Every structure is written in C-alpha cells, then in structure tokens.
Amino acid sequence: MASQMMETKELHENYMKILEDLTTSAHQIQEQVLGEILMRNAGTEYLRGFLNGQANKQLFKRNVPIVTYEDIKPYIERIAKGETSDILLTDPITQFIQSTGTSGGQPKLIPLTAESFERRMIEPSLVDLVMKKTDYLSNWITDPGCKNAMSSILTGPNPELADSIEHICYNKSWEGIIKKLWPKTKCISSIITGSMSQYISLLEFYGGRIPLVSPSYASSEATFGINLKPLCKPSDASYTFLPNMAYFEFLPVNNNTKEKAIEFKFDGASAKVSSELTNEDGNVIPVDLADVKLGQCYEVVVTTLTGLYRYRNEDVLKVTGFHNNSPQFQFVERQNVILSIDLDKTSEVELLKAITNAKHILNPLGLVLTTYSSYSDTSSTPGRYVKFLELKMKASDNLPKLDSQDNGTTLLYSGRILRFYI
C-alpha cells in the first residue's frame, strides 16, 4: 500500500512538472507545434495551393484563409468516402469524431489520428492531477482493481438495495437525490458554460450541495485547456490553455471594425467586448496565444495535427488571467448564435440574461427551470422573441397555475410549458 501511494505521488509530481513546463514555455511550444504541422502537411492537396509546398510560418499566416466547417466539409467528405490521397494531412486517419451538433445544429465529422488521440489523453491525466490537488477526492478511486471490485459486488439481484432505491425515488421531491442514491459522491463533472449553463440550477437541485465541476474546455475539434480551480463557482470557471494541443490564434471580437467597447453582465460576471484595429483590407487581424490581452474577448482559431487549418471554433472567450505564460480564458458565448427580428439582434448572452431574470421570478414560487427553447415570432407587428420554459416544482410534480407579470415579462401557464415573451 505504501509503495502504491509513493508511485501515485511520483506520478502526480511528474504531471505537475509537465503542466508547469507547458505553461512556462507556452510561446516556444506554440511555435514548435505550428512548425511540426507545416513540416508534415505543407505538401497536402489543401495546403499546397497556399504554401507551394513550403513549411513557412509567415506564408501560412499570410495565405491560408481562416475557415469554418462548411469551407472544409467537401475535403472531409472525400476522406470519409475512402479517398486515400493526402487531401488534408499525411498521417493516416484512424477514425472520425462526430460532434453532437449542439453548436450549429448539424453534427460535424472531425478526423482523428493515432497520435492526436494520444495527445488528447494528456488532458484527462492533468485534470485528474488538478482534482486530487484539491484534497476533495479520495485516492481510492484510482485503484487499478476498481473494476474487478465492482464485478465482485454486482454478482446478482439485491432486493434490499432495490427496495432502498425505490423508497428514495418514490418521494415527491427529488431534491438532493444524487447524494441520497450515491452518498460518497464528491462532485458532479459537467459542461456548465454557454447554453449548458441553463442546467446549473437543475444540477444544483438534484445534487444538493455537491460541487459542480467543469474540469476542462474541449470540443470535437481540439482540446484547449483545463480548469486549475475546479471547485470554483460555475460562473467563475476559467481554463488555462495547453499550448501543446494545437496551434491557437485569436480573432479580437469587434463591432463594425470601430474602436469601441461594449460591456455586458451575466450572472454577476462582466465581460468587455473590444474591437481591435484591422488591416488595410478591413479584416480583423488574429493574434497569437502569447499576445492576447487581459480583459479582452477573442474568438478561437485553431490549427491541428488532424487537418484543420485556421479553423474558426466560433467560441468567444475572455482573458481572465495567466498561469505562468499561458493565458486563462472564461467562456462568454457562441459566435453567431443569435435571434433576429428586422434590424434587432439578440445574442446568446442576452438570451441567457433573460433566462436568469426569469429564474428570479420562478424561484420564490418553488419552480426549477429544466430546459428552454426560443424562436423569433413575426406573426404579429411588432415582432417578439418567445421562450418556452419547461419547469418542475421543487417539492412535487404538480405545477400551480401562474399568471405573473414583472418588468414587462409575462409567464402564461400551459401545462408544463410556460411561454415567456421578451
């Protein structure tokens, strides 16, 4: 047992050193990553037209366009159909990851190689290290014999346990049910940023006082960073970028290319969206990871080992600090997630703010928001934005009749769905 604890401690120290080395040498590692990607793939069909086969970083930034998934979709579809030529990358593609489609509505096919998969495995190890450094999770969960132990426990029917679960679930209210069913639960690991933040209140309802943890920031396209303070409040979660995962550039979020700032607030957190100077063509100039500025907001552009070059992630992030020389970002919103009526534009942040205001009305009534949907209603003049809120009672499943008005917000009872006009 003592030797196992010593091995675990040594492993943690090694990973901590890796984390410190990565964040201390962030700029140098970023240059190495880009150089490695270009050396391997400058001669591919896609890059050859921009680089003429040269692994030149300046040529890459000058000639390779910033793209979205739709721009490279034809190339990915050719690979998926079995073409074997070096279309996007020279390394063999071992599999495709299919995105969930929560960002843009349609799933995406993202290529993956054996090497890129191994790199992605670094992130869970670093996350595990950070979680253990909080002294909140017990070391027993790392026991390699855990699976065997579970197999020995689940040997057959357990009537007493079944009766206990039935008794717990039979209660009218499921508030705190996670802790009742799994008393040793230490935290709930979940995505709690952006549109997923709508589920925070529901997770808090079912979890009671169990901490909500957002350990990392990743997508189907790439792994970006980890949360070094996993037990912070969901609204305070910031992610330290890992410079070895991909080559990152950042598009300053601008407003009609004019030098001005817009400040908005959501759940007590404020973010400043500031436009930057553009080049002579009127295009916003992306900056490197080493050149981001504290307090500024950027859209992430990523270049990966798996054939994505200057790919717009469409996430807007705010720089909240630095760990050594690696920036830390807080998620702000998805780019282009917007409702529109005529000339009016309503962003994701504004929609989530409206939801937050609705929660303030619902909470005193003993109601919990479980999910919502929205659309632009132009059937009447003037048009309006409509939100459908699905609710549940904290103490039971029986919803009362509601007819509440507050600051121009109207809640109309309609079975389990409330219509919310803004």
Image (tube, rainbow, N blue to C red):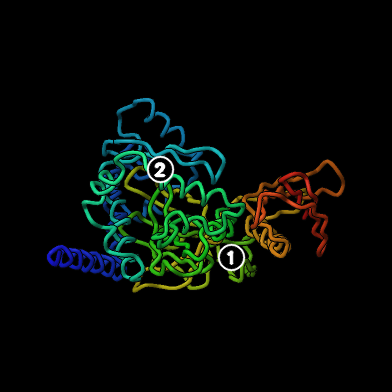
> Residue at (70%, 63%) from the top-left corner?
357
Q: Tell me where residue 352 appears, x and y as whole percent.
A: 64, 58
Left or right: where does residue 257 sit relative to residue 127?
right
Q: Tell me where residue 148 appears, x and y as whole percent.
A: 23, 46
Q: Is residue 220 visible?
A: yes
Mark 2 lies on residue = 159
The three-letter code of the residue at mark 1 reads Ser
Mark 1 lies on residue = 275
- Mark 2 or 1: the one toward you: 2
The three-letter code of the residue at mark 2 reads Pro
**Mark before the other along the chain sequence, 2 or 1:** 2
> Residue at (83%, 41%) from the top-left corner?
379
- Image height check: is 114 above or below 344? above
Q: Tell me where residue 19 appears, x and y as whole percent.
A: 28, 66
Q: Secondary structure at mark 1?
A: loop
Left or right: where does residue 415 sit relative to residue 21?
right
- Image height check: is 359 above or below 312? below
Determine the residue located farthest toward the left in the rendered image. Answer: 3
In terms of depth relative to the viewer, which is nearer, 89 or 172?
Answer: 172
Counting labels gives 2
- Image height check: is 113 above or below 382? above
> Residue at (80%, 50%) from the top-left corner?
412
Q: Residues within 10 Å of mark 2 (few under 14, many from 20)?
A: few
Q: Tell me where residue 292 appears, x and y as whole percent.
A: 45, 68
Q: Marks 2 and 1: CB-CB under 8 Å?
A: no
Q: Secondary structure at mark 2?
A: helix
Left or right: where does residue 355 sit relative to residue 315?
right
In terms of depth relative to the viewer, which is nearer, 419 or 118?
Answer: 419
> Residue at (67%, 46%) from the top-left corner?
373
Q: What label does residue 362 carry, if any?
A: none
Q: Residues within 10 Å of mark 1 (few under 14, many from 20)?
A: many
